[in-house]
Amino acid sequence: TVPEPARGQVEKKTSGPAQAVQLTGLRETFVHLWRTPSLRHVVIGSTLVSFIGYGGVAFGAAFLMRSHGLGLAQVGTILAPLGGLMGIIGALSAGKLADKLALKDARWTAWIVAIAKTCAIPLALVFYLTDNLVIAFIAYAPMVALSATYQASTFSMVQTLTPLKVRTQASAILLFIINFIGLGGGPLTVGYLSDVLNPEYGVDSLRYALLTVSMLGLWGAYHYYQAGRHYRDDLEKVGILDKLPATA
């Protein structure tokens, strides 16, 4: 809700590529995100994958302790460095790959995430269902890397399709939605499902709660696929596609 300062000094212009879209306030920026097809799908997709991610972060340690018998110190020693390292690798690698493929077809910016989220599903099945701890962590490492792939593409698309003067506001709205629904609802849903499943599955109720929520990744992948389908058209509308390399 804070008024935006003048934008465009770095680009040496006072309006962004999306010159046809005149946004003056919070409501207009929100409407722009919703009415632009690729941005609408990106917002929904990123909210879904963050919903999964926050639920997994909140209860991942508890799952390993309950279902695999690890102690708190063991979980922290293994989970924190492995998850952090693979998250960094996944986010940076996806951004680099999306930049490279987008030079040939801009739609790959979103499709990279759709593929990653789809590939993460079988890894989640292995991680949550196996009783072999070694196999679990072998599946966990690439699963975390694939889970982090949405960040670069999501914010890149939002910034690209939003006028200069409200880019910060657009990102703030996206972060608000991601945190309000993802962080606010992800852990809550996992905990609720675990309680519901506890009478039947006992100590493994958390295993199946986390697995159930992780299946939302397919829904998220669908929205990133749809975002890619609309991305070229949306780029044309804001006058960016004609500025991309000839191979695009």
Image (cartoon, rainbow, N blue to C red):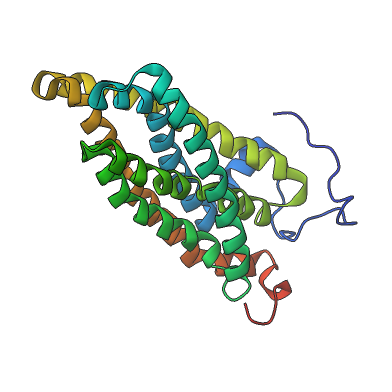
Classify 46 as above or below 17.
above
Place of residue 199 in the rendered image (x, y in percent of width and height, measured from the top left): 10, 18
The residue drawn where x is 47% and y is 62% is 111
The residue drawn where x is 66% and y is 71% is 241
Place of residue 103 in the rendered image (x, y in percent of width and height, measured from the top left): 63, 72
Classify 108 as above or below 206.
below
Q: Outermost residue, left direction? A: 200
Residue 246 visible, this angle: yes
The residue drawn where x is 63% and y is 64% is 99
Residue 181 visible, this angle: no
> Residue 223, located in which quarter of the rendered image?
bottom left
Using the image as rendered, state which of residue 35 and residue 187 is in the foreground. 187
Place of residue 232 in the rendered image (x, y in percent of width and height, measured from the top left): 57, 69
The residue drawn where x is 68% and y is 82% is 246
Classify 210 as above or below 232.
above
> Residue 214, located in which quarter of the rendered image?
top left
